Image (spheres, rainbow, N blue to C red):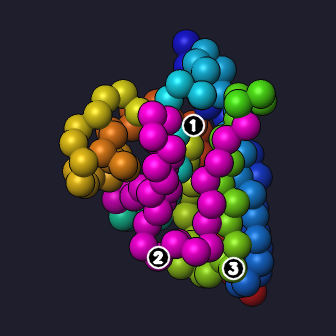
Amino acid sequence: QVQLVESGGGLVQPGGSLTLSCAASGLTLDYYEIGWFRQVPGKEREGVSCLNSNDGRTYYLDSVKGRFTVSRDNAKNTMYLQMNNLKPEDTAVYYCATPGRFIRDGAVGPTICGGFEYDHWGQGTQVTVSS
């Protein structure tokens, strides 16, 4: 059974940094695409960043490019989202995820990133950016 457990959320001031972690069990992350999504109450979930395992390509939401970095530590079977220069609009519940299937390059949707549809989710961790 696949389990993804996030940690690292919290309250941070604008301009600050946080690193989210997601420990995986029941699968070897090295073999899978990995993704981070976020959701604000009343809005659709959106893909923030993802990393494709076959070619190493990374994808970032336009509003986080240059500020967020997705990575993984295969030895720890853990994925990370380093978030720098955080802004109030980054406030959301953040979810780590692994995908179920490839749709197509350029596919868009609330659970799609890098062409993959994600269907295994962590429990989410709250990130609040406020002074």
Question: Dot 3: few (<14), some (14–19), or many (≥20) neighbours within 10 Å?
Answer: some
Q: Which mark is residue 85?
A: 3
Q: Quadrant of the C terminus?
A: bottom right
Spatial CA distance of label 1 from label 2 is 23 Å
Residue 2 placed where, x, y %? 55, 19
Q: How many marks?
A: 3
Q: Which mark is residue 63?
A: 2
Q: Which residues are magenta?
A: 44-73
**Residue 66 makes an appearance in the image:** yes
Which image quadrant for residue 25? top right
Residue 1 placed where, x, y %? 55, 13
Residue 110 placed where, x, y %? 32, 52
Q: Earlier in the sequence, mark 2 or mark 3?
A: 2
Say above or below: 55 vs 84: above
Q: Earlier in the sequence, mark 1 or mark 2?
A: 2
Per the image, the residue denoted by label 1 is 122
Question: Dot 2: few (<14), some (14–19), or many (≥20) neighbours within 10 Å?
Answer: few
User: Disc 2 vs disc 3: Cβ atoms closer than 8 Å?
Assistant: no
Spatial CA distance of label 1 from label 3 is 24 Å
- Foreground pick, 96 / 116: 116
**Does the magenta portion include 48?**
yes
Q: Farthest front residue?
A: 55
Q: Nearer the viewer, mark 1 or mark 3?
A: 3
Q: State the residue at coordinates (58%, 18%).
A: 27
**Residue 125 makes an appearance in the image:** no
Say above or below: 95 vs 86: above
